[in-house]
Structure formats: C-alpha cells, structure tokens
Image (cartoon, rainbow, N blue to C red):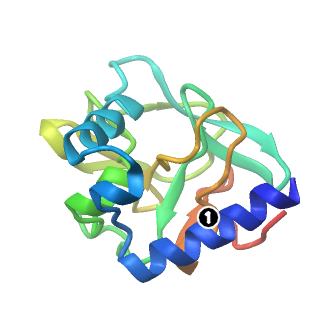
C-alpha cells in the first residue's frame, strides 16, 4: 500500500509541474485515445439513475459516483460560478461528473447538489456549488489516487466538503 501512495505522490508532483496535462509520450498513447478513455470514464448519467452516493473509505465516508468511483473537487473552482476552471487538457485526466438532466439523483449526500453547463451539452454536477470530477488513474471503486494531487484536488465527504487528510 505504501508503494501505491509513493507512486501517487510522485505522480501528483509530476502533474503539478506539468499543469495537469500529459503529452502523448507521458500516457503511452496518442491524444485521441486519451480523449476516448476519459469520455468513456464518466458518461452522463441517465435521468433517474443515482449519480452520487456515499461509500466508506480510509478517509471516512466519501462521495462516489453511481458506479462507486471516487468523486473530487478542484480547489481553484469558484463556488457558484456557473462554470468549471478545469480546461480541456485538465478534463482529459479529470473527467467531469455529468448528467443528462439538471436534477441529478443522489443518495446519502447531504450537500447542495446542482449543475453547471457541462461538456457536450450535458450537465456537470456541482456539490456545494463546486463542479465534481473523477480521476483518470482511479480504475476501480475504492481508488483515491487523485487525493491531494498538486494540493488542488480533493475527495468530497458526505456533506460535500473537501477532505484534506490522507490515509
């Protein structure tokens, strides 16, 4: 487990230095494939589907998407700004949590849930006024490799607040 965290810390530092973007040589694939991976990572949730719920983690009870994948906020995003500040390159690695409706369904999340205009005409979900994201390197439910990346990305707790602690 320590080796995973060491890797996450090294990867975090690399992302911070590179401005949250990879080039084709970093990912081992071309940009088109990265776009396809991130698009399929977090497709818009259908109307009526549970979009956010809670899960137990080493950091306490956290917010996850409908498939159990960890949800994050980007600290530079401004509350209630009606947009995110994660640019196109950033979104390749931090896909927006999106919905096909402006009224996403949540379970166990006791926060102000809303939406802002999202990519491709979808709605990006907001938690306490900040847009929500997933992390490309999180591959299975329980992964939290995005926690603390660049001191900008944080897991969200059940009340919609960022979790600043680490395991």
In the displayed structure image, the side of residue 84 where residue 73 appears, left or right: right
Asked whether residue 126 appears in the rendered view, the answer is no
In the displayed structure image, the side of residue 9 where residue 154 appears, left or right: left
Q: How many marks?
A: 1
In the displayed structure image, the side of residue 91 where residue 48 appears, left or right: right
Q: Residue 12 falls in which quadrant of the image?
A: bottom right
Q: Residue 67 falls in which quadrant of the image?
A: top right
Q: Give the x, y percent position of residue 26.
A: 39, 59
Q: Nearer the viewer, residue 58 or 127?
A: 58
Q: How crowded is the residue under tag 1: few (<14 C-alpha within 10 Å), some, or many (20+)?
A: some
Q: Give the x, y percent position of residue 156.
A: 61, 57
Residue positioned 87% across, 52% down in the render: 1
Q: Residue 43 falls in which quadrant of the image?
A: top left
Vertical side of 145 occupied by 104: above or below: above
Residue positioned 31% across, 51% down in the render: 92
Residue positioned 68% across, 55% down in the render: 157
Q: Give the x, y percent position of residue 49.
A: 44, 18
In the displayed structure image, the side of residue 99 where residue 129 appears, left or right: right
Vertical side of 110 occupied by 80: above or below: below
Furthest toward the left, the residue is: 121
The residue where tag 1 is placed is 161
Residue positioned 21% across, 59% down in the render: 88
Asked whether residue 15 appears in the rendered view, the answer is yes
Q: Quadrant of the C terminus?
A: bottom right
Vertical side of 137 occupied by 53: above or below: above
Q: Nearer the viewer, residue 119 or 145?
A: 145
Q: Nearer the viewer, residue 99 or 5?
A: 5
Vertical side of 72 occupied by 163: above or below: below
Find numbered disc 1 in the image and state the secondary structure of the residue it sits on.
Answer: loop
């Amino acid at each position: 487990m320590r080796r995973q965290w060491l890797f996450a810390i090294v990867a975090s530092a690399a992302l911070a230095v590179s401005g949250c973007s990879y080039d084709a040589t970093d990912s081992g694939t071309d940009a088109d494939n990265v776009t396809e991976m991130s698009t399929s990572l977090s497709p818009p949730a259908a109307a009526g589907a549970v979009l956010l719920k809670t899960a137990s983690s080493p950091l306490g009870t956290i917010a996850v998407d409908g498939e159990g994948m960890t949800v994050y906020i980007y600290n530079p995003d401004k509350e209630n700004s009606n947009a995110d500040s994660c640019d196109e390159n950033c979104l390749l690695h931090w896909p927006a949590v999106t919905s096909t409706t402006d009224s996403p369904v949540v379970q166990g999340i006791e926060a102000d849930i809303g939406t802002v205009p999202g990519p491709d005409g979808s709605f990006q979900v907001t938690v306490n006024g900040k847009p929500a994201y997933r992390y490309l390197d999180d591959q299975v439910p329980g992964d939290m490799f995005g926690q603390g990346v660049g001191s900008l990305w944080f897991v969200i707790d059940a009340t919609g607040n960022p979790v600043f602690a680490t395991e």
